[in-house]
């Protein structure tokens, strides 16, 4: 009986030591969201003046909004409440603009070019462009393979297109998702965390 008690006590000690060892294991590193404080979007089209979209916020441009059901906005709603970004001028109707996005973290000195980080982690990021009340058709002009070796043909959105239709005005919502599901059909099933969200009020004029 004494031998059995001794064996059981030894087993308890071993299990306790094993539990302590597991508790001491270092946690896996967490890939934190990028801090983005400024975004500049340049829209170019042959024969047309460049249009610059810009916004900055020292607190960062990320939001925790739930975008399930995106695309259900009332397209006749042109309320400017919550519009944040500024456009240097109107877009022309019937034109395809090529857009490029530049991102910075200006909370540090010198400022950090976050665009490079997005390129390096292209498989973990994707921009989404949602027009509200605007006759605009967004499209992607890049893929992961443009930035990383062995990357797929899933889009990233650092380069994109906007094809304008009829004159009017409304919002263009630009969202950057971190670790979205790829491929996806849009914000509805992309998931991931929001690194950046900005609305731009745009006019399409002759």
Image: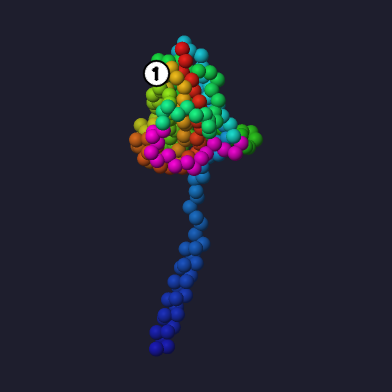
For the residue pair 65 and 42, the one nearer the viewer reads as: 65
Q: Position of residue 48 (x, y in %)?
A: 48, 13
Q: In terms of image quadrants, where is residue 8?
A: bottom left
Q: Position of residue 50 (x, y in %)?
A: 51, 17
Up-down relation of residue 85 to residue 64 (above or below): above
Q: Which residue is mark 1?
A: 165
Q: Considering the whole magenta stretch, tell me its main secondary structure.
A: loop
Residue at 50% over, 25% down: 201
Name the outermost residue toward the top.
47
For the residue pair 7 and 94, the one nearer the viewer reads as: 94
Up-down relation of residue 144 to residue 64 (above or below): above
Q: Position of residue 192 (x, y in %)?
A: 43, 42
| Chain part drawn in magenta | 58-73
- Residue 78 within the magenta-colored segment of the rendering: no
Residue at 54% over, 28% down: 85
- Is residue 59 shown left or right of residue 25? right
Residue at 46% over, 68% down: 18
Q: Is residue 27 visible?
A: yes
Element at label 1:
loop
Question: Few, some or many C-alpha atoms within 10 Å of disc 1 (few <14, some 14-19, many ≥20)?
Answer: some
């Amino acid at each position: 009986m004494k031998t059995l008690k001794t064996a059981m006590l030894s087993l308890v000690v071993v299990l306790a030591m094993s539990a302590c060892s597991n508790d001491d294991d270092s946690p896996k590193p967490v890939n934190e969201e990028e801090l983005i404080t400024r975004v500049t979007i340049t829209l170019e089209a042959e024969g047309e003046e460049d249009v610059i979209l810009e916004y900055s916020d020292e607190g960062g441009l990320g939001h925790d909004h739930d975008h399930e059901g995106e695309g259900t906005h009332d397209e006749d709603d042109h309320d400017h409440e919550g519009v944040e970004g500024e456009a240097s001028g109107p877009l022309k109707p019937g034109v395809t603009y090529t857009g490029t996005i530049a991102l910075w973290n200006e909370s540090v000195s010198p400022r950090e070019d976050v665009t490079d980080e997005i390129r390096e982690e292209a498989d973990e990021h994707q921009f989404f462009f949602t027009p509200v009340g605007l006759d605009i058709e967004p499209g992607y002009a890049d893929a992961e393979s443009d930035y990383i070796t062995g990357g797929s043909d899933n889009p990233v959105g650092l380069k994109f297109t906007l094809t304008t239709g009829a004159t009017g005005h409304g919002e263009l919502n630009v969202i950057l998702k971190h670790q979205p599901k790829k491929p996806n059909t849009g914000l509805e099933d992309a998931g991931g965390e929001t690194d950046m969200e900005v609305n731009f009020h745009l006019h399409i004029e002759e």
